[in-house]
Image: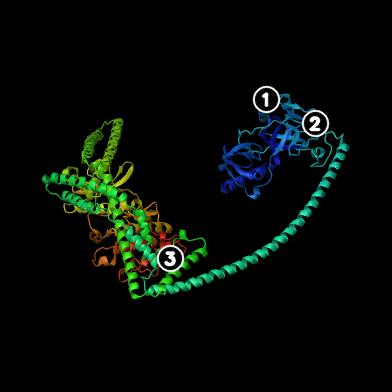
Amino acid sequence: MESVCVSHVEDAVTFWGQAIGKIHDISKLSDSLARTCPKMNPVLATPDPDKIYGGMFTADKCWYRCKLQRMLNDDQYLATYIDYGNSEILNQASIVELPDDLQFPAFAQKYRLWGLQLQECNNIEQGLKFLNQLIADKQVSVQQKVTYKDGTIAGQVLHENIDVGEEVANKGFAEKCKNVSSPEGNTGSSVCGLKTPQWVSRKLERPPMREPKTLPVLSTINHKESDTWKEVNCGNHFTGPRVWSPDVNFGNTNKNDSRLLEENKLLKDERDSLIEKSNMLKSQINKLQLDLQKEKEVSEESIRDLEGNLQSAVGNKFNSLASKIEILRSVRCENANVHSEDDLLQAVIDVTEEKLVSPPSLSNLDETWEKYNLAQETIKYCSDVTKLSLLINRRDNIQQELLSVVDCFILEVDELPLDSRTADLKFFDLSSEISLESSEVVCNIDELLDQVECHVSKELDVSLMEHDEADRQIIIHAYNRVVQCIHEELQLISLVVSKYSTSAEFKKSIVEWIDRSPNINQLMSVKKTIKGLKSQLRWKLVERSNMEDTDESNETILAELKEEIRTLRNTIFSEILREQEEYRTLGSLVLKWFPELPLIHPEAGILNYMNSGGLLFGSIERDLFDAEPMKELSSKRPLVRAEIENRMVLLKGYSVGVDTEEKVVERAAKYHQVWSSLKDDSGLMELICLFFCKADPVVYLIVPFYPEESLSAVQEKNTLMSHEILKVMSGVAQGLQILHAAGIIVGALHRNNVFALNREKGIIGDFDFTRDANQRSSITMVGFPHITAPELKLGHAATEASDMYAYGCLFLWLCLGNNNITMKQDGSPDLSQLTLDPKVKSLLSGLLCCGDRLCAEEVKAHECFQAGSVLYSSTSDEAAENTPADFA
């Protein structure tokens, strides 16, 4: 007898289970699979049907061992959980490889109810459900009767004093076998010839059995009795001792033994025959190996001889070719104009006989373009509006004439073989140095060497040929004339191609406007809509203020009113974006075709938009924002926080006068243009828009709001680590490089206008556009005395170099934190005693000096920003963990 826990029922007489004694092993296996499977590679190739894999059960997301029976489609397999006996369809992504230490036999065993065979197929499902309810996930006692060749164990099954086989038979889901005493089954199906149906795999209806929370108490087994109950094996041989069993009839033992002896003799004869064949094959293999070894030795020797001959042949060819090239080089140095007469003659023929001539309409095109551009310039700078219409009519007439000339020019150029002619002139440009591309290398090295030697010999023969002075002068003159003609014609082709491109673009763009002029009706309509919406907003704001001042205000009505105000604000900002789109369209038309638009419609403010680079928003007002004061960030100027279309922004106000207003727009527009070239990759903070206050002399700049991400705030809250410092300062160097290339000097680079976004992206923030670089650098920043370069303290003007000094100071501050730095007599920090990485110290030495400093481009490319760089020469980051410092 043995105690078995049933894990899965297959039909009315078949089930799977594990011995209770192995339940701890199953628990250990589950833990091992949970640790191992997530780290293993997924199964991508065709699975091995003999291997064991790990499978993710979809219901409880746990891992089990399984065997893959067959593929159902491109990414699904029918898998059998070998430790539980049931099957499931698994996606290929839910199957992983298992290591060798998990490739051991299953704990599950297959059992059948002794002496029973299945009924007809129409009762299969009902019988399965009955047996499943009776014993699934329960402990049963099994008295083994016989073991089949496929490992199936047939036995009497008891559960709580109930004979399970009798219950199944009584319910009519299986019938008793007619003969159960003769274990002669050789197929491993059933000793009584059970009618096993052709099963179709069903998808698992419940998860595989896991270890129960409490183990059942095993009943005491009578060892004396159990010694008499031994399993009896069926088939050609026994798997255990053949002892007496009360349910097996040994009446035919002598007959069976005789048959077994006969079968053993046949097997022995077959074995001897196979051994003889194996010895014969082994002898043949040995002979083939000896022959192969001899052939291999002969082949290797032949290859060595061939390699030696080939090396010698190639070496001889190169030596001969090198000597000829050396002679030819000296001849060319003596006279660079000596070339093969055949090539020169062919070049003369091709260059002179098939020469391209300038299209007849080209000169007319140039004249008409010149008249058209002059007419546009005249309109642009016209100050007398009364003469404007006359100038526009004259321009339109020239425009029609230009379009006609362009059509004629395009037709003429389309007839010219420009591409093929250009290719021919590359070929005959005797002065060009054309290198052989890797894709053009001839695979046959011998053929390539022969061609080179032929050309070198030909040119050498011609070069060494004696010429009288008259022939020599003819050749030189012809050569110089060919080169001149080639260059002239190539320049002509380049000019024609350029003018063709310009003409085609003009024709494509002007067709839309040839018979009509643009207007500002759409722009003015949007402006009118914005004006009406702003009026509604003001009334709503007054209504909200009155309601909030009332003691008996209705909270529901007040909430509805606030929502209306929020919706109105969003609508106004959406219309303002439409207004800016109209400005962009009109500004493009002014630059290309209609310079008269700002003169005809001064009320539209097109020039203001264009002069600001699209940064100036005329319809935005301070009252449109539901702003929150930010006194903690700035006490010197108005600074508020607001939300625009779900984006938090800062409104920075600057006092301006009549003389500074234009300068502010100019400086901000230049900065905005530099940012627009690379945008988020520029290392600069975006300027969202610029607008003037109508009531006060204040200009407002709208920028993104980065709360607590300035270097000052970041270092105070949680100092940057070494790798983060390198990332941030690399971005700041990128920003300085972009600004300096555009001629913009920051003048006051400090820890409050440098930001570390997400602790890894460094950008330079906006600065005071009401002042120039010298004015910004002359203002002493409280708490930032170290950013001032020594030359600025002497009264010199701010330069790119002074920006780089401030950059170096910020870098050093991030590295050393609160440590005091000794200053040298010239006013620069003394770096000699610092424990920094040599690369970083080299960078700082090139920045914190009084002489020539590194420029931003050199800093960006410095080796300390390469992968794998560190800040400190020691292993400790102790210095970087301190708070910000002031340099003494």
Mark 1 against mark 3, which lies toward the viewer?
1
* Residue 835 visible to the viewer: no
Q: Position of residue 330 (x, y in %)?
A: 41, 75
Q: Position of residue 214 (x, y in %)?
A: 65, 38
Residue designated by label 3: 837
Q: How many marks?
A: 3
Mark 2 against mark 1, which lies toward the viewer?
1
The label shown at residue 180 is 2
The label shown at residue 303 is none
User: Which image quarter: residue 469?
Assistant: bottom left
Q: What amino acid type should be assigned to the residue bearing mark 2? A: Val
Pointers 3 and 2 in contact (C-beta within 8 Å): no
Q: Residues within 10 Å of mark 2 (few under 14, many from 20)?
A: some
Q: Secondary structure at mark 2?
A: loop
* Residue 123 visible to the viewer: yes
Q: Secondary structure at mark 3?
A: loop
Q: What amino acid type should be assigned to the residue bearing mark 1? A: Asn
Q: Secondary structure at mark 1?
A: helix
Is residue 261 found left or right of 25 in the rendered image?
right
The label shown at residue 122 is 1
Residue drawn at (65%, 32%) of the image: 200
Q: Position of residue 45 (x, y in %)?
A: 59, 46
